[in-house]
């Protein structure tokens, strides 16, 4: 949710921190701040707004120093304002701290600290941490790493923190629990800390991912120590980052979202690379190989995820039931985790997450794991928490997704789900060899078909212009395209702030039809396939009430063309692959409408990319 970056080395820290905050801004962007130690003084600069506003605020002030911490915030406790922005400073003025996560028992700790004479300035839960650490350090006469460790023992909640000490600018102390933290190991003893690798990759490819319950102590001249909460040291496991810097740049596009929509032919191809073997007529998913038999024997698959990942899970439900004939339940992770659901050891739980850090999905996994289910992850971010806590999994390989609205991650998730369902269907014998062969060839041709959809962007933009001032919109789909309708509606509401609902087309007459009038745009996925005729009837029902129909149709369709106000053609494909094509025009419609309405497409209000709080 929030972005954390820190530096200790021989370079000036401020430019590294600000650059890192720009990279992290997608994680939260309501306020930002940095703290530096400059000639024995703690300098803290922070303000409401984006990183650019912080830069303007710091301009002209002393920002020298070779150690510092930086933060970009997504508010949980306390409004986004200058005071609540991080870093927070201890009453003594010696410690500055940045935090990602939530301290659940902050109220009790705060009361105790107030009695002990600490002065609170902000309304945040975070501030208790810095006072608590400082209190323990001075009252117990302890060094900083031990004071941090002891303080965290009394904390309930989730955190990634970094602490900077005015009295010892040669040290940074960090810790994590349920919120990610990466250490970058650079040149000449320099080190970076960040909530993900995006601010690190341009400085070093060598990283250490901290595990839950671990602390990192970085000391000038001594390097990095990784400790657990029992103060036991472990040898840091240094890995090489696979991320490339170009993936973090807009590459000539106006927005990350547009770049990521246009990347889909490549990202879908990357999701299939090395997994789809047309010559041998097989699908190989190396990451789940050891658990393949459990998958094949599964009595039930439970798919958990949130938001767009949950929508991908719904497509997965159709895929597994259709191709592998395994019953599937798709659950919002946030509901599932608190429901005491019935889970059997023969169940496969599929957890889907772009970031691999979503708190609700992580908690759902832990709960299902404790009940003995096999957990398979589908994640985009390599080395993320979900990727590490699952028994096995398949990365989506979509590359970093920076736009807050998920686009290429969705199609990559659906691609991996398709591969899994095909593989399991083949192994279970529920898919005839001829159908399997036809589908893998069709899947292979999807990237080229997505290119064709993207080539229609000017027409899609033209339609967007007509509906840019809509106040409501309805999205309808049926069968495999019902989840696409949900996803289309989510894309529109989250970036253009137009109220939108997705519905199964036939369900419309059970309520939403009352909303239809001549002002209401209704986006319908009406491609040729099993439900085509039925969807055509649903379109007639909308037209009879003077609603405006924008239909996604199969190339060459004449029937819907004759009824709809606008059509967007997409290439033909088997029903189970249509989600990968039909979602693309809906992504573009939302993008263009949002741009036309002057919205911040990449950083929509109130949202953040990685939801590490429940
Ligand atoms: C919507 C969107 C969110 C995420 C959701 C889950 O565009 O991005 O709905 O899909 O927060 O995030 P992940 O996939 O990272 O678990």
Image (cartoon, rainbow, N blue to C red):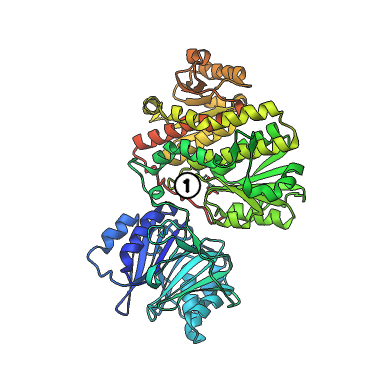
Vertical position of residue 280 compared to residue 553: above or below: below
Give x and y (percent) for residue 387.
59, 54
The image shows residue 242, relative to residue 501, as above or below, that is: below
Question: Left of 261 or right of it: where is 140?
Answer: right
Task: Please name whichever residue, 84 or 341, is drawn nearer the observer in this view of the structure.
Answer: 341
- Kindly state the secondary structure of the residue where label 1 is placed: loop
* Residue furthest out toward the front: 279
How many numbered callouts? 1
Q: Nearer the viewer, residue 200 or 475?
A: 200
Horizontal and vertical percent for residue 189?
Answer: 40, 72
Q: Which residue is mark 1?
A: 399
> In screen coordinates, is 298 left or right of 314?
right
| Place of residue 565 in the rendered image (x, y in percent of width and height, measured from the top left) | 45, 18
User: Can I make out residue 503 in this image?
Assistant: no
Which quadrant of the structure image shows residue 424?
top right
Residue 21, quarter of picture: bottom left
**Horizontal arrangement in the rendering, residue 592 relative to residue 272 (left or right):** left
* Residue situated in front as seen by the camera: 112 or 219: 219
Q: Residues within 10 Å of mark 1 (few under 14, many from 20)?
A: many
Q: Residue at x 33, y 68 (%)?
A: 13
């Amino acid at each position: 949710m929030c972005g954390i970056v820190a530096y200790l080395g021989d370079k000036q820290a401020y430019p590294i921190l600000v650059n890192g905050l720009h990279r992290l801004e997608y994680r939260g962007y309501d306020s930002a701040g940095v703290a530096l130690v400059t000639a024995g003084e703690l300098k803290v600069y922070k303000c409401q707004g984006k990183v650019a506003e912080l830069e303007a605020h710091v301009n002209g002030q002393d920002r020298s120093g070779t150690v510092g911490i930086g933060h970009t915030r997504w508010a949980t406790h306390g409004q986004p304002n200058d005071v609540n922005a991080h870093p927070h400073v201890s009453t003594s003025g010696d410690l500055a701290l940045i935090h990602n996560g939530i301290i659940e028992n902050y109220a009790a700790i705060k009361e105790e600290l107030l009695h002990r004479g600490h002065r609170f300035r902000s309304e945040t839960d975070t501030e208790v941490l810095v006072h608590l650490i400082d209190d323990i350090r001075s009252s117990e006469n302890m060094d900083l790493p031990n004071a941090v460790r002891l303080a965290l023992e009394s904390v309930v909640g989730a955190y990634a923190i970094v602490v900077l000490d005015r009295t010892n600018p040669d040290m940074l102390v960090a810790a994590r629990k349920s919120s990610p933290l990466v250490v970058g190991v650079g040149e000449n003893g320099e080190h970076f800390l960040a909530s993900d690798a995006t601010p690190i990759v341009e400085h070093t490819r060598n990283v250490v991912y901290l595990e839950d319950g671990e602390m990192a102590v970085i000391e000038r001249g001594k390097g990095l120590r990784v400790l657990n909460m029992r103060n036991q040291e472990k040898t840091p496991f240094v890995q090489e980052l696979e991320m490339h810097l170009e993936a973090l740049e807009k590459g000539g596009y106006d927005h990350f979202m547009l770049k990521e929509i246009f990347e889909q032919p490549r990202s879908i191809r990357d999701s299939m690379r090395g997994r789809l073997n047309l010559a041998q007529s097989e699908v190989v998913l190396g990451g789940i190989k050891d658990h393949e038999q459990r998958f094949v024997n599964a009595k039930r698959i439970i798919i958990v995820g949130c938001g767009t990942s949950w929508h991908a899970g719904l497509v997965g439900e159709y895929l597994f039931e259709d191709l592998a004939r395994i019953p599937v339940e798709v659950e919002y992770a946030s509901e599932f985790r608190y429901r005491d659901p019935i889970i059997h050891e023969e169940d496969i739980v599929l957890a889907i997450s772009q970031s691999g850090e979503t708190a609700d999905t992580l908690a759902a996994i832990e709960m299902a794991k404790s009940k003995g289910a096999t957990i398979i992850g589908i994640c985009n971010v390599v080395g993320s928490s979900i990727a590490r806590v699952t028994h096995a999994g398949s990365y989506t390989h979509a590359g970093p997704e920076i736009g807050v609205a998920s686009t290429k991650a969705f199609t990559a998730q659906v691609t991996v789900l398709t591969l899994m369902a095909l593989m399991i269907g083949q192994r279970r014998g529920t898919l005839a060899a001829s159908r399997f062969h036809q589908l893998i060839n069709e899947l292979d041709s999807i990237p080229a078909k997505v290119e064709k959809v993207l080539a229609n962007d000017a027409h899609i933009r033209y339609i967007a212009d007509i509906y840019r001032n809509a106040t409501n919109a309805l999205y309808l789909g049926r069968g495999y395209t019902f989840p696409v309708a949900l996803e289309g509606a989510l894309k529109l509401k989250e970036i253009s702030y137009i109220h939108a609902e997705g519905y199964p087309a036939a369900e419309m007459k059970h309520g939403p039809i009352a909303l239809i009038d001549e002002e209401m745009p209704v986006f319908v996925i009406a491609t040729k396939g099993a439900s085509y005729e039925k969807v055509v009837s649903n379109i007639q029902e909308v037209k009879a009430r003077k609603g405006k129909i924008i239909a996604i149709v199969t190339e060459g369709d004449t029937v819907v063309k004759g009824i709809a106000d606008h059509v967007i053609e997409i290439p033909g494909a088997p029903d189970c692959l249509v989600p990968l094509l039909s979602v693309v025009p809906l992504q573009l419609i939302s993008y263009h409408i949002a741009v036309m309405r002057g919205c911040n497409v990449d950083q929509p209000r109130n949202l953040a990319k990685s939801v590490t709080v429940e």
